């Protein structure tokens, strides 16, 4: 992994995780928020790519200085343009409802078999996935318990990804990368190959690995080191600082380039 000062490429889009990449202990600080505005003012389109729910993404797409947002680990994207909210979902409402019933069974099993877990507090505004909290609003669980959560999802045929705070699980063959490329193609007419040149990605945890693997211009904030042994495809550049301050570093490197 390289120092940020070595980054010399011009990009048009920055895709970025939110939790513990833009935030510090759950809060969006002034440095990271100012960095979003600076990128936008300099014609670099920012696209948050997050495990957070539809309810959050509606606000982010409408209020933040971003081109759109990919939410629930790729279950949809929202884009607010010309006073119109564009919403694209992987599945129609009927399929979403069928999957929700299956996820409710997994929820009961996880909460019964893995003491100390809880539903994520934002579960009530999710449409596509189930989020199990293992350290956001509950005392942090050891990796062995987190892996038990993952195993229960997988036993039911669901996908499961570990973020810095939640295990997110869903039914369907999609992830952050597939929906990000779909967003770029549909909204900006950028092919998957063109995206490798025009885009960069910043993240912090194992569920960002497909993005680091795909994009040559890949970044992480310093707290990625907490997960480095669990990540096969590592980011190319790492900030000195963690969280929002680290993201501000990344933004400055992109702007200087």
Image (spheres, helix red, strand yellow):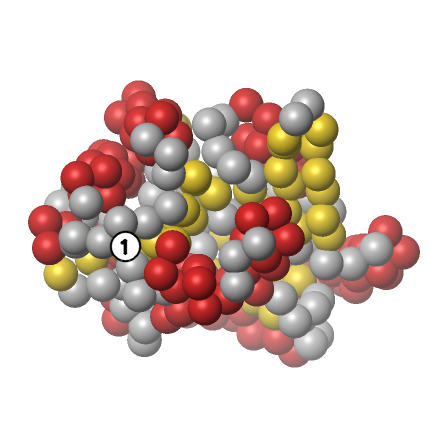
Quarter of image, res 253: top left
Quadrant the C terminus occupies? top left
Question: Is the residue marked by circle 1 packed among few (<14), some (14-19), or many (20+) residues within 10 Å?
Answer: many
Question: Looking at the image, how many numbered discs can be counted on the residues?
Answer: 1
Q: Which residue is mark 1?
A: 219
Residue 125 visible? The answer is no
Viewer-proximal residue, 175 or 115? 175
Q: Is residue 40 visible?
A: yes
Task: Tell me: residue 245, above or below residue 75.
Answer: above
Residue occupying the point 13% across, 61% down? 2
Front residue of 120/235: it is 235
- Vertical placement of 168 versus 24: above or below? below
Q: Where is residue 246, by image quadrant? A: top left
Residue at 13%, 46% in the rendered image: 240
Residue drawn where x is 68% and y is 23% of the image:
83
The N terminus lies in quadrant: bottom left
Looking at the image, which residue is at 27% across and 26% down? 31
Measured from the top left, where is residue 121 in percent x and y?
A: 59, 37
Question: Picture coordinates of residue 13 (x, y %)?
Answer: 40, 46
Q: Residue furthest right?
A: 94
């Amino acid at each position: 992994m390289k120092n940020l000062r070595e980054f010399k490429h011009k990009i048009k889009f920055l895709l970025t995780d939110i939790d513990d990449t833009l935030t510090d202990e759950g809060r969006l600080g002034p440095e990271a928020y100012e960095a979003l505005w600076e990128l936008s003012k300099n014609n670099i389109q920012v696209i948050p790519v997050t495990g957070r729910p539809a309810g959050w993404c509606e606000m982010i797409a409408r209020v933040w200085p971003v081109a759109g947002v990919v939410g629930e680990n790729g279950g949809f994207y929202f884009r607010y343009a010309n006073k119109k909210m564009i919403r694209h979902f992987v599945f129609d409402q009927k399929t979403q409802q069928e999957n929700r019933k299956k996820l409710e069974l997994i929820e009961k099993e996880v909460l019964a078999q893995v003491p100390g877990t809880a539903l994520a507090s934002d579960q009530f505004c999710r449409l596509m996935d189930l989020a199990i909290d293992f350290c956001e609003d509950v005392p942090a669980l050891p990796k062995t318990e987190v892996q038990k959560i993952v195993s229960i999802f997988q036993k039911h045929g669901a996908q499961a990804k570990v973020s810095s705070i939640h295990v997110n699980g869903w039914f369907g063959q999609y992830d952050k990368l597939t929906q990000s490329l779909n967003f770029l193609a549909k909204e900006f007419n950028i092919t998957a190959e063109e995206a490798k040149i025009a885009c960069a990605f910043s993240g912090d945890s194992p569920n960002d690995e497909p993005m680091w693997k795909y994009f040559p211009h890949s970044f992480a904030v310093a707290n990625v080191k907490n997960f480095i042994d669990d990540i096969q495809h590592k980011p190319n550049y790492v900030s000195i600082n963690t969280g929002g301050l680290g993201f501000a570093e990344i933004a400055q490197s992109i702007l200087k380039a």
